[in-house]
Image (tube, rainbow, N blue to C red):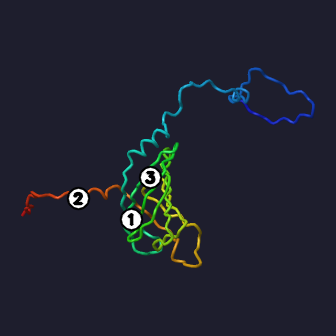
Amino acid sequence: MPLLLAMDLPVGSQVPFDANPQLPLDPIQLAVPLKVDQGDVESFDPVARASELAESLPRQWCGTFEPFDGNPTVDVTLDISQLTAMGQMVDIRGTMTFGSVTTPVQGNLHAKSDQLDLIPLADPLIAGLEPGGVFLGLQDFSPTGWQAPRLVNVANPSTGVGGRLALTIRCQEEPPVYQDELPVQPLW
């Protein structure tokens, strides 16, 4: 096994050169790029996926917003009126209803990373949400967290504390109704 020792050489002295070094990691050989197949490394097309999402994304989402300050959970609906593909991004426009408060909303969905940002545009929002904040999601629409525009609101400390928004497309489906149910009989 070769042993590498440090050498103390005076300035201007000649350094011995070995054309066939015995060390396994030769810096000269490591600096030479390896020949790689010239095929595509990534076959995923985020621009095409953004176009596909703009056409196929559901237009209505339902869920809940749970504030972190202990306020009650609020039912939420998101009605998307316009989806536009812009390169790798999908521009989202619509309205969002928090309980009885409805606000216009706009946002972006990144087709490659599935990151989402939704910005409520109305000035009076519900407790726990402050104008200027944004919902950020790492996996499409659910779950998303609220990022307040500032850490503390001195004028109204109950706003902007944040919360969790969970949206699903299940609001369009209704539970199945079974007309001909079989009676359940006990075993004994």
Q: Amino acid at mark 1?
A: Val
According to the picture, the residue beneath numbered tag 1 turns out to be 76
Q: Secondary structure at mark 2?
A: loop
Q: Amino acid at mark 3?
A: Asp
Q: Amino acid at mark 2?
A: Pro
Image quarter of the C terminus:
bottom left
According to the picture, the residue beneath numbered tag 3 turns out to be 140
Q: Residue at x 42, y 42 (%)?
A: 52
Q: What x and y, as percent, mark residue 133?
A: 54, 65
Marks 3 and 1, how far apart in space? Answer: 16 Å
Q: Residues within 10 Å of mark 2 (few under 14, many from 20)?
A: few
Closest to the observer, 83 or 132 = 83
Relative vertical location of residue 158 with respect to residue 44 in this rendering, above or below: below
Q: Residue at x 44, y 75 (%)?
A: 70
Relative vertical location of residue 36 with respect to residue 8 in this rendering, above or below: above
Closest to the observer, 121 or 172 = 121
The label number, if any, that marks residue 175 in the structure image: 2
